[in-house]
Amino acid sequence: MGLAVTFYVSFHAYQLNLHSTERAFQRLAAAETDNVFEIMREVEDSQLEALARFFESSVHVDAEEFHRFAGFLQRKKTVWGWSWAPVVAVSRKSAFEAKARMDGLENFSVRNYQTSQGTFSSDADGWMYPLLFVEPQIKGPSVLGLDLGSIPKLRDALEESLDTALVTSSVPLSFSLGGEPFSGALVFRPVFQRNGEPRGVIAAFLDIKTLLQAYSGENGKSISEIKIFQMEPNGSIKLLGLYGETEEETESGSLSGASSVISVLHAYGKTYIVETPKDPAFWGHYSPRWWLVTSLGGFFVSGSLATFAGAQTWKRRYLRRQVAEKTAALQESEERYRSVFENSHASMLIIDPQDGTIYDANPAAEKFYGWDRQTLKAMKITDINTMSPEDVREEMDKAKKTFQTVFAFRHRRADGSIADVEVFSGPFLIKGDTYLFSVIHDVTSRRKAEEALRDSEERQKAFINTSSEIMFIKDEQLRYVVVNDSACEFLGRPKEEILGKTDFDLMGGKKAELLYRSDIGALQSGNSCVTEETIGERIYETTKFPVPLKRGNKGLGCIIRDVTDQKYHESRLRHVATHDGLTGLANRSLSQDRLEQAILHAKRNGGSVGVLLLDLDRFKVLNDSLGHSFGDELLCAVARRLEGIVRESDTVARLGGDEFVLLLSDVARGKDIHSVALKVVQEISKPYVIANREVTVTASLGFSIFPQDGYDAETLVRLADVAMYEAKRKGRNKVQQYAEGMDRQVMVVHEMEMELRKAVELGKLMLEFQPVANTLKGRVESIEVLTRWNHPTYGIISPADFIPLAEETELIFPIGEWVIEETCRSMKDMFRSGVNPVQFSINLSAVQFRSKNLVGTLEHCLEKYSINPGHVMFELTETQIMHDPEGASEIMKRLSRLGFRIALDDFGTGYSSLNHLRRFPVSIIKIDKSFVHDAVIDPSAAAIAVSIVAIAHNLGLSTVAEGVETFEQLDLVKGWECDAYQGYLLSKPLNLEMMRKFLLDRSDSEMT
């Protein structure tokens, strides 16, 4: 009976303690997994990141700086070591090695990894990743210069890190580093330059033994053995490392099975499985052999029950103490977990994989989903996931069986919105039961960005293919990797025959060699470059520019455009910008540039430069009377005539309006410039035929010479302009070279212009009247109206001195209108005072004669003062009407039809023909005073005068001799049978009141 009781009690105790210890061990294993994850995350978030930031904030890091910084991190002893490997182009290998030696690394050289299987190289794609710094510094054979890219198991992870800009881990591997064995994985953190180009990678040598020793050194070892496996993308697993009392160097890819606790964690872009085998040391106190010994002892020592009970009591106390210690550690672990769970900013859910019920949710999940914790715990994952329940269940089963940890779902939220989420999920033990621990990241913005990027890429692809421009991209080996349809057409091949080929494959020969040199030059320069090439009659513009490719490589982008039409339009724009739109001559800007170039040439080689500035005389009169189109054609005709005078090396330019400039470069003698100037004026004055109408125009020309008149372009043009105005002042159709002091005369003219303008405004002009009498009877037949300027300084100024200035400044229009109106007013006053009506003769300037407002002004004044147009006569000079005989004839006919009479003044001094004289509606011819004065001593002058009178009488015209000052001259005039005379012998010009008295006195004497 005692034996049975002993056996029952022992077995029952064994089962109870076994179950309790199982659950305690699972808690401790989960806590150990959390610790491993925390340390791995610390390596990434704190240590790798700190070292990377150190590089990113430094333009240059030397060996001493690296060892000082990395040495500080190494004190934590969480990893086996740290290293820095820059990205180096193979083409810069020698330069990189030389720089490293200059920085103090003696005998430094880049080399490939060697094994018993041979040597591996990373030169294929043009980039190397040599170890430049390693901490701790290894005392054995130097590892510096080892190209990490030449280690096959490292290269993929290394390039993945640079391509994705993320922390990545290599596969588990074992190799010797400077004589020191290493087994584990390398964790890479990329570092980039400020322009986005890869600078290098920081590598942490992750060794599980070192990592867990760092943890156990701080917290004490709780479990004697831990194994960590890395999961491959194909689902297979590989041992990363183990830690325990019986360490076995193995690459076994199998788990121990039911005798272990298995957890999953995610770090460095990989999935890891942590296996915690049941610890014999932990279980040693619970061996089933103790109850058998107790049973046998019952046979022999049945009387020892009391002693046994005491021993049993001691054992239980011992177990309780062990369990209490383990439970406290487990509680501490759970508290850490709970702290992370509650305080994390990431949304976290714990899900029951059996039915999908949400076991728990943290505050971040409440905020993200919009439901409180209790509501979430009452929901199932199918209430949140937009996938069907069957699909959700299938995904959870897959996660449980295959250790898949990352999922992409769409989750509902309380407000009805749908969020794209990325879920990191894995098995998690709670009180011995397995749950799914899920960390949810909102990737809605990222998904939208990715979708926008895909749309952008599609649009870009569509744009490239629909563009008429030739576009393609070549890789670092100058192989075509992207071509659009226009490029295919340009190369004359389908896309399939172009991609992956070089120009040597497609065309070969010299053309391919030229393209290769051009492409290599563009790649090495690192900048965009633009070239032009003419093929046949077309012009192509080629733009080449660097294009970033994967793995830090650089390719070459190329855009070829047909710019033939563009070049034509650019040429036209340049021509428009530098040439006159009407005549096609150089404009002011181009003439200025050419003058400066001519001066520089003359300074270097000697010689002279002439600047000839000319202005067409009375062009405005022609332009206003005959129309702007007529004036434009005349300007073009003048331009062609000027071009025919000078050499091809000279420049003819139009400065604007009717002003031209001729630049005579490389002239040997200054007097040659004067000869050309005279020829220009002579040729310009020859008649033109415009629109079937003959017209004559003259020019006033001024010129200056380099170097005698000035040394710069601006001065020479200004002085030529001064000389031109002096030529106009002297009577037009003249040539004038600049002389010292001439610019002061121009200033005087300018001052006079201002004073004349003020005189017009203030009414300082006045009229005087000179009678014209019948030669035989002495009766006054008409009165000539003469305009005078009463200048405050110079006194009375005659019209010959200020009318040309008025014409140039267009003051002639207000002056002419005032003269007509004042004449009409004077006529009315005089006729009212009892004077017999006589004709008043008004002189019209050439500008006023061709003014469109002339007739309107006359009609207004005649109506205002009730004047009979038959009492008004207009005097026109022979010269002014012969510039455009046909146009002048039309104007004179219009005046004649209105009832006005017309006199031809200064006859004999111009070059009118008898045919023109016959066609003009002229009533009177006035013989110039020069014939009257010269006839006394020059018989030929008298003969001309006699001829003029005879011609006039034959045409039915009356004649008036001007300038008769003596009785001798009057006798000559009477002998010519001239009808009337005018001059000082009869009367000087008088004011209105004196003229009224003169007429009344003459009338009284004639009556008596």
Image: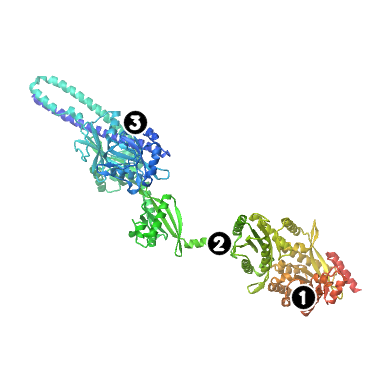
Amino acid type shown at disc 2: His
Helix or strand or loop: what does disc 2 sit on?
Answer: helix
- Which residue is the site of mark 1? 923
Q: Amino acid at mark 1?
A: Ser
- Against 299, residue 275 (above or below) is below
Q: CA distance from mark 3 to mark 1?
A: 125 Å
Indicate which disc, 2 or 3, sits on the residue closer to the N terminus: 3
Does the residue at mark 1 contact the one at mark 2 (Cβ under 8 Å)? no
- Residue 283: quarter of image: top left
Residue 370 in view in this figure: no
Is 71 left or right of 322, judged from the image as shown? Answer: right
Distance between the alpha carbons at the discs numbered 1 and 2: 53 Å
Q: Nearer the viewer, mark 3 or mark 1?
A: 3
Q: Which residue is farthest bottom? A: 954
Mark positioned earlier in the residue sequence (1 or 2)? 2
- Mark 1 packing: few (<14 Cα in 10 Å), some, or many (20+)? some
Q: Pick whichever of labels 3 and 1 is earlier in the sequence.
A: 3
Q: Name the spot of residue 97 as percent of width and height, x first.
A: 38, 41
The relative height of residue 509 versus residue 547 in the rendered view (above or below) is below
Q: Nearer the viewer, residue 963 or 646?
A: 646
Q: Is residue 172 above or below residue 528?
A: above
Q: Which residue is mark 2?
A: 575
Relative horizontal placement of residue 9, taking residue 174 as reference (left or right): left
Residue 275 locus on image (x, y percent)? 23, 36
Q: Residue 75, labelled with which disc?
A: 3
